[in-house]
Every structure is written in structure tokens, then in C-alpha cells.
Image (cartoon, rainbow, N blue to C red):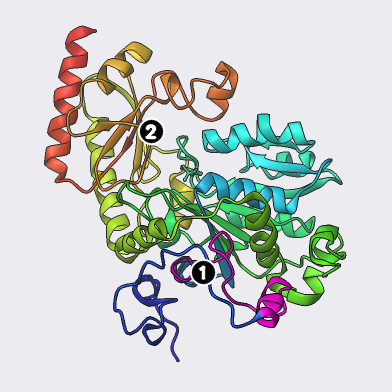
């Protein structure tokens, strides 16, 4: 059979209609638990001797379809879904790492991930170093014998920097460390990190994949290309105390990490997605290819237009020739550069706040990737808890305004921004 295009996979992958009474839509299996045939069947399922449904914290047929679909689109061997993107990230790191381990991370991570790595994980003895991931020497200098993962975002939020994934992957391979890429902003329609050597791909499904601002979700896709038996992950190769001495790597080979993430990460940490949310996210995923294209077109249009408006000091969008990442965007983002645009006003911090308070169509809120256009002033909101130094490192300048460009008519969006600019300029 010919390879199926991602656009087709988004509509069909993982759903076998003969297993769902012929339903064309993916059904919502709103159940907590599943009837066992008998006690032997139950014992085999609990002992991982046989795969099947046990309890919806571990697996569920609706979630299962979403997992298979995401794996097909990203080009991985499988995936596990979670209650949120943050749950996917924390469960992954807590499944892989232990006291004394070290994470090497990009210095432009999403604020929530930065806090997890910088403040919360150190309480459990897991430390992180943050580096400019586009400087290979900096990465190599900060790798030590305890470094167990490298964590980057394909497009940083809100810095909108593009990481040269291929370069980072080469270093990760050299040191036999898995490379984790958060692909939330780009989505698999703009970049497939596995093609460039990523080992695990993480998504906040809450953003472009769900796409309509109604459901939280997260996922981890395993490329199946990392040797979990390389000696650096005894938790995966040695007998598991939680499973009567089961050796995950010996038993499940390439899928060892994914199985462990499910049967220990979900079993013990418990951040499972509800099947109702998985259903909503599947609806979003089906139209992702056309939505992300339109988000990208609208965003490029707005970015170009903003450059010529009075009172605007600077505009950052990876699709603009003036972006520091334009060259990398020509390599990695040839189908579009996603829907986020940032810009600053001549009036600085106060003008940015005034502008953010003055839009009508753009909603002031803490989300991205919605069909509706959104706006936020990170320095006074999402990144307020960061020190001034950390704000600059993560790319949050005091005057930065972040737009998440929706699917509205672009002329209406420009009119809204123009009116907000006029109101701001008249006050400064
Ligand atoms: C939003 C976001 C997350 C966190 O996802 P939630 O679903 O909000 O928990 C992680 N990474 C990036 C890049 C994000 O934008």
C-alpha cells in the first residue's frame, strides 16, 4: 500500500469502523472501566502479558484512536495522551529521570516548562541547564555524565526562535542522549521533528491541534529510533520493582519507553485525558492541515502590515525577511510559519498594556492556537513571575505583545489592530 499523506491520516488513522459498529465519527467511550472475561484474563492484562483495556486512567478506546492518529501524523511508532501538554512533559521527565539526573534545555522554553525545569524538578534532585540551542558549543559545554535528556521547542513561545533540530539531534546522538522536541507551535503539518532526528515529540493538544479553545490535552509520540538499552536508562533495562521484575526493554524493545510511560507514568502519576476531551481534539485534528495553513497566511499578512504602522517599533515573525530566524524558517517551515506574531510599540511597557486593553476582536487571554484571534502582554501576565533576567532570556521584552492570529477575515483583524493603535498613540 502507498504511504498515506498526513492530511488523509488526520481524518482516518487509528479508527477501524468495523470495531465501532460502523460509526463514521469516532465515538466517545465515556467509561471508567472494562468488563474482564474472567480472572485469568484480568490477571494477564494486569501483568502486561496481554494488551487490553483495564481502566481509563491507563487506556480508553477513544483516547487510543487519538494516540494512533497522532503517531501516524508525526511518523512515530506510538503515542500516549495526557490531560494537558504540561502533564505530557512532566510525566515524560518523571518517567525517564531520577534524583541526580540533569536536563539540557533550550533557554527559550514555554514559561510553564521553564518553571517546571527551573523551580519544581530541582526539589526532586533533577537539575537543568538552559542554553542557546542554536549554539552547538554551548550545548556540548553543558552536557555532563548525568545529562539524560535534551529538551527543545521547534518554535519557541513567545520568542518565535526556530531551533536547528538536525544540528541538535547530531549532538544528542553523539552523546547517546534522547532529544525531546515540543512541537506545539509548529504542529506536524509545518515540521516533523522525527525527520530531523528527534526521538520524542511532545504536544500541547490544547493549542493548534484541538484548535478551538475548548479542551486541554497533551501527547508524547515516540519515534522508535532511540536505543533505550544503551546503558543510560537502568529504569528501563533493569527489573522493574513495580512489575514483579519485568524488564521493559527486553520485553517491549523499541516500545519500552512508551509502555513504561503508560503503565507507570499514567498508573502512578495519573494525568489521563478524558475521552470527552480526546473526542474534541480528534475533531480539531481532522481540520488541522487547512487551519494551520490559513493561520500562517493570516499571520504573515498581519506581520507585514504591522511593520508599516505608526507607533510600531519592531515586528517579529519567522516568515519575515527581517527575522533572525528567516534562514532557518526557509529550511524547516516551508509550508508556513504558524499563527504567532510578536511586536513592540515605541511607547514601551505602558503602551503595550494600553494597546492590549484596546482591541475588540482580539481577546485578551492566556492561550494560543484558537480559531479566534487572541492577544496578551506576557511581561505583565504569563511571564510576570520570571525575574527580569529570565524574562529577557525567554525573549519576553517589556514592550512585547503576542498575537495568536485566528481565522477571521484579515481586513477585520487589521481594522481592530488599527483602532487599538490609534487609541494607544493618542495617549502617548
Ligand atoms: C501551552 C504550551 C504547553 C503546555 O500545554 P498545556 O496544554 O497548557 O498544559 C507546552 N508547550 C508549549 C510550547 C505551549 O505553548
Quadrant location of the C terminus in the rendered image? top left
Does residue 153 appear to the left or right of 370 in the view shown? right
Q: Nearer the viewer, residue 322 or 198?
A: 198
Q: Is residue 48 above or below residue 175?
A: below
The answer to which quarter of the image holds residue 244 is bottom right
Q: Is residue 324 above or below residue 222?
A: above
Q: Residue furthest front?
A: 38
Quadrant location of the N terminus in the rendered image? bottom left
Is residue 188 in the magenta section? no
Residue 350 in picture, x, y percent from top left: 33, 11
> The magenta stretch spans which residues?
39-65
Q: Nearer the viewer, residue 370 or 83?
A: 83
Residue annotated with mark 2: 366
Residue annotated with mark 1: 71
Residue 58 in picture, x, y percent from top left: 59, 63
Going 21% across and 21% down the picture, which residue do you hit?
Answer: 358
Q: Earlier in the sequence, mark 1 or mark 2?
A: 1
Going 87% across and 65% down the picture, which residue do you hit?
Answer: 239
CA–CA distance in space, label 1 to label 2: 28 Å
Going 37% across and 63% down the picture, which residue do you hit?
Answer: 282
Q: Residue furthest top?
A: 428
Cβ atoms under marks 1 and 2 closer than 8 Å: no
Q: How many marks?
A: 2
Residue 218 in picture, x, y percent from top left: 50, 53
Going 55% across and 66% down the picture, which residue do you hit?
Answer: 59
* Secondary structure of residue under mark 1: helix
Q: Residue furthest bottom?
A: 1
Q: Residues within 10 Å of mark 1 (few under 14, many from 20)?
A: many
Is residue 51 in the magenta section? yes
Q: Residues within 10 Å of mark 2 (few under 14, many from 20)?
A: few
Amino acid at each position: 500500500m502507498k504511504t498515506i499523506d498526513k492530511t488523509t491520516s488526520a481524518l482516518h488513522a487509528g479508527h477501524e469502523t468495523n470495531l465501532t459498529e460502523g460509526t463514521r465519527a469516532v465515538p466517545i467511550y465515556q467509561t471508567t472501566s472494562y468488563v474482564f472475561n474472567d480472572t485469568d484474563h484480568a490477571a494477564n492484562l494486569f501483568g502486561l502479558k496481554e494488551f487490553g483495556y483495564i481502566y481509563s486512567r491507563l487506556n480508553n478506546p477513544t483516547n487510543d484512536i487519538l494516540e494512533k492518529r497522532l503517531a501516524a501524523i508525526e511518523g512515530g511508532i506510538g503515542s500516549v495522551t495526557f490531560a494537558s501538554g504540561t502533564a505530557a512533559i512532566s510525566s515524560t521527565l518523571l518517567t525517564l529521570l531520577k534524583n541526580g539526573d540533569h536536563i539540557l534545555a533550550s533557554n527559550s522554553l514555554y514559561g510553564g516548562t521553564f518553571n517546571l525545569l527551573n523551580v519544581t524538578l530541582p526539589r526532586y534532585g533533577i537539575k537543568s541547564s538552559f542554553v542557546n540551542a542554536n549554539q552547538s558549543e554551548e550545548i556540548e559545554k553543558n552536557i555532563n555524565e548525568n545529562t539524560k535528556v535534551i529538551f527543545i521547542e521547534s518554535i519557541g513561545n513567545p520568542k518565535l526562535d526556530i531551533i536547528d533540530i538536525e544540528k541538535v539531534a547530531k549532538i544528542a546522538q553523539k552523546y547517546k542522549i534522547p532529544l525531546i522536541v515540543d512541537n506545539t507551535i509548529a504542529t506536524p503539518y509545518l515540521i516533523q521533528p522525527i525527520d530531523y532526528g528527534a526521538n520524542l515529540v511532545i504536544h500541547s493538544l490544547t493549542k493548534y491541534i484541538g484548535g478551538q479553545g475548548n479542551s486541554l490535552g497533551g501527547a508524547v509520540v515516540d519515534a522508535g529510533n532511540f536505543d533505550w538499552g544503551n546503558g543510560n536508562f537502568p529504569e528501563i533495562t533493569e527489573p522493574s520493582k513495580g512489575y514483579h521484575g519485568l524488564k521493559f526493554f527486553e520485553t517491549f524493545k523499541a516500545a519500552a519507553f512508551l509502555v513504561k510511560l503508560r503503565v507507570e507514568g499514567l498508573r502512578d502519576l495519573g494525568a489521563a485525558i478524558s475521552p470527552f476531551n480526546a473526542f474534541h481534539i480528534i475533531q480539531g485534528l481532522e481540520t488541522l492541515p487547512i487551519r494551520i495553513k490559513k493561520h500562517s497566511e493570516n499571520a504573515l499578512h498581519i506581520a507585514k502590515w504591522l511593520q508599516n504602522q505608526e507607533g510600531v517599533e519592531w515586528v517579529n515573525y519567522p516568515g519575515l525577511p527581517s527575522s533572525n530566524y528567516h534562514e532557518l524558517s526557509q529550511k524547516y517551515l516551508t509550508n508556513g510559519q504558524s499563527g504567532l506574531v510578536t511586536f513592540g510599540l515605541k511607547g514601551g511597557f505602558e503602551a503595550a498594556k494600553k494597546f492590549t486593553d484596546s482591541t475588540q476582536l482580539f481577546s485578551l487571554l492566556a492561550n494560543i492556537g484558537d480559531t479566534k484571534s487572541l492577544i496578551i502582554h506576557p511581561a505583565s501576565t504569563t511571564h510576570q513571575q520570571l525575574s527580569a533576567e529570565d524574562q529577557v532570556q525567554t525573549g519576553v521584552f517589556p514592550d512585547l505583545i503576542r498575537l495568536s492570529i485566528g481565522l477571521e477575515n484579515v481586513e477585520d483583524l487589521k481594522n481592530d489592530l488599527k483602532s487599538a493603535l490609534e487609541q494607544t498613540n493618542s495617549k502617548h
